[in-house]
Structure formats: C-alpha cells, structure tokens
Image (cartoon, helix red, strand yellow):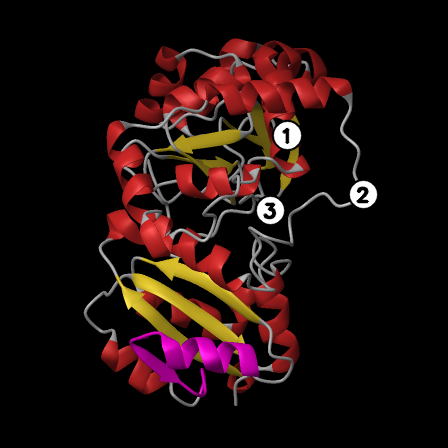
C-alpha cells in the first residue's frame, strides 16, 4: 500500500490511525471524528505514492469537504494540487493518515514540522505556489523586503517556535531556515488573525494581524477597524474579517513570498483612491452590469443625480431600471 520511505516512517512513528480508503472508510472517519477533533493529517495517493500534509480544527468537516465533488470543482479550490489529484485519481485511491490530534493553538507549528520532515509532493506551501522561473522586478524585490520587515512575532509565538524546534524535533539542526520555512512558523492562527476576502467572498489570504496588513499596504489601523465594524468593502474590492465566513474556506494564497501575494498587495495599494465603489445590477434580472469607482463616476456615466443613487441604495429600491449597491453580491451571509 505505501511506498518504502513512507512505510518506514509510519513504522517508526506513533501515528493515530490509518484509513486505507478515503471514500469507502468515510463512515468510520466521520464517526471517529464526530466530536470536532483538530489535528494534522496526510492524504496519501496509493497510485503514485505522492502525498499531502494538512491540518484542521475539524477533521470531519475537512474530509467532508474533500469528499464533496462539487466543492472541489469550485474556482477557489480546483487549482490546488491535492484537489486536482483527488479529482484525477478518485477518492478511494487515497488513504487518510491521522498523524496526531492537537489543540488549535498548536496546529500550525506542528503542521510546519511535518511538512519539513516529510517534504510532501502535493503540499502547496512547498511546491505549487512557488514562482519558478519568475524574475521579480526591483520594485517587487523592495516590496518583498518591506513585507518581511513588517512581520513581528508575539512572545507566545516565539515560545511555540522555540518549543517546536528543540532537540530531535528540529530538522534544521546546524542549518538555516529558508524564507518559506520562516513564514510557516510565523503564520500561526491567533485571535489577532484577519481574513481577506474578495468581493465575491473568495478567501484570498489569512494574515496574522491588522498591523501586518496596514504596514504592507500603507493604510492605518483606524481605517481597517472601521471596515471590520461596518462590513464595508475595503477600496471597493475586499472584505476584511476577523473570522472565517464559512467553516471550510481555504485561502487561495498560502505563501507570503509568492508572486500571487505580491500582486494582491500591489493591487490593494493601487486602489487607494477608491473610497466606496458602486455596483450596478439590472433591476429585472438582478444580473451584475458593472462597477464604478465612486458615486461621482456613477452619476457622470449614467446621468443620474448622486442623491437619488444614494437614496435608492439606502431604501433598497430600483432606480431607472437599475439596482445600486455598495456590494458586488446582492445577498450576503452577513449584514
């Protein structure tokens, strides 16, 4: 069932349990984890011996997510290497290995350890989102440097890092950490974490704090806190939340040293001039038509007084065949 290296690793470590077939063993998996258990796991492809290391605060919920074909085919999920593999090879060609159960506060540190120990082929933090062959411009290099300098660790995080890398558990003894490894260690889920969604509610990235975001995009904490409290779009394109909107949301960007992250930060900087975007829909079909960068542009392009536009938004009524909104989606899961 397992390749030689992983079989040897399994034999020499006290993993919790192995489910040979992800799909056929789904009832046992759900029953064993019906009380929301958090921990670190492996999805092992028995066809080609490749595997993926992940962690979840709710293993049962995460496996339901993997077993749901429609969920895997969503735009925000379908390009992940492990998702592509599940769709290509089928669920029963994968085994589920529970490495260990842990409190939520220890998940990221221990997941980082196992990633560095096992070097999983499918794991996006090691391979999939590296910009192989991409040469950064001098401007981008400077931005990357400033992003790195902006990150700081809390005393609690420093202690977790210290505990997780002592003695034989330190796979880098006598070596230096790469930038990716440092980011894995620092990206701890904490009460200060913020979640950045686009205006279609696709989770883009999870950051450690508001301060990390404000330093990266040259904003201030007061502005971000106002966005959080009022459920407004930030610069017309992003929702900033202090919790997940949906339990199984998976961020599209995992690596803060990747080109995708740099592009996101540059886009957020570029949209600084947008205070409050206006979204226009067809009043009959409810179909989205276009976005304006502000009320003045909307007034000019559609030749409708801005007072009437604001009034229609506040009263949630159609105007001249249009529905105007401050949100890209007319039905939001939050008010």
Query: Residue 271 lies in magenta, yes or no?
Result: no
Q: Please report contact status of discs 2 and 3: CB closer than 8 Å, yes or no.
A: no
Circle 2 sits in a helix, a strand or a loop, which is it?
loop
Sort mark 3 into few (<14), some (14-19) or many (20+) by Cα contacts within 10 Å: few
For discs 1 and 2, the disc positioned in front in the rendered view: 2
Name the N-terminal-most of marks 3 and 1. 1
Circle 1 sits in a helix, a strand or a loop, which is it?
helix
Q: Position of residue 74 (x, y in %)?
A: 57, 60
* Camera sees residue 252: yes
- The residue to which callout 1 is attached is 262
Using the rendered view, name the quadrant where residue 283 is placed: top right
Name the N-terminal-most of marks 2 and 3. 2
Calculate the distance from the C-alpha at mark 1 to the C-alpha at mark 2.
16 Å
Calculate the distance from the C-alpha at mark 3 to the C-alpha at mark 1.
37 Å
For discs 2 and 3, the disc positioned in front in the rendered view: 2
- The residue to which callout 2 is attached is 133
- Residue under the point 26% across and 52% down: 104
Q: Position of residue 113 (x, y in %)?
A: 41, 54
- The residue to which callout 3 is attached is 285
Q: Position of residue 207 (x, y in %)?
A: 43, 33
Where is 39 relative to 327, above or below? below
Classify residue 22 as left or right of residue 164: right
Classify residue 204 as left or right of residue 297: left
């Amino acid at each position: 069932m397992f390749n030689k290296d992983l079989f040897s690793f399994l034999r020499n470590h006290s993993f919790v349990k192995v489910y040979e077939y992800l799909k056929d063993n789904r009832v046992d998996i759900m029953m064993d984890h019906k009380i929301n258990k958090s921990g670190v796991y492996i999805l092992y492809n028995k066809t080609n011996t490749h595997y993926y290391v992940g962690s979840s605060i709710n293993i049962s919920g995460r496996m339901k997510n993997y077993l749901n074909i429609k969920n895997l085919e969503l735009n925000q999920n379908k390009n992940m290497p492990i998702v592509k593999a599940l769709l290509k090879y089928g669920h029963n060609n994968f085994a589920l290995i529970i490495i260990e159960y842990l409190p939520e506060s220890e998940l990221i540190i221990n997941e980082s350890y196992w990633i560095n120990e096992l070097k999983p082929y499918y794991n996006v933090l090691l391979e999939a989102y590296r910009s192989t062959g991409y040469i950064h411009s001098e401007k981008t290099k400077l931005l990357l440097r400033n992003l790195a300098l902006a990150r700081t660790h809390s005393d609690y995080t420093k202690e977790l890092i210290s505990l997780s890398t002592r003695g034989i558990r330190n796979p880098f003894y006598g070596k230096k950490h790469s930038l990716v490894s440092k980011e894995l260690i620092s990206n701890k889920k904490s009460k200060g974490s913020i979640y950045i969604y686009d205006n279609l509610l696709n989770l883009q990235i999870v950051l450690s704090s508001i301060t990390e975001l404000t330093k990266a995009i040259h904003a201030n904490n007061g502005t971000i806190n106002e966005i959080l409290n009022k459920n407004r779009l930030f610069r017309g394109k992003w929702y900033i939340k202090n919790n997940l909107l949906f339990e199984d949301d998976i961020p599209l960007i995992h690596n803060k040293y990747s080109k995708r992250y740099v592009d996101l930060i540059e886009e957020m900087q570029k949209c600084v001039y947008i205070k409050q975007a206006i979204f226009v829909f067809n009043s009959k079909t409810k179909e989205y038509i276009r976005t304006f960068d502000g009320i003045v542009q909307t007034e000019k392009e559609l030749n409708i007084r801005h007072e009437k536009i604001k009034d229609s938004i506040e009263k949630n009524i159609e105007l001249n065949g249009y529905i105007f909104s401050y949100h890209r989606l007319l039905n939001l899961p939050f008010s």
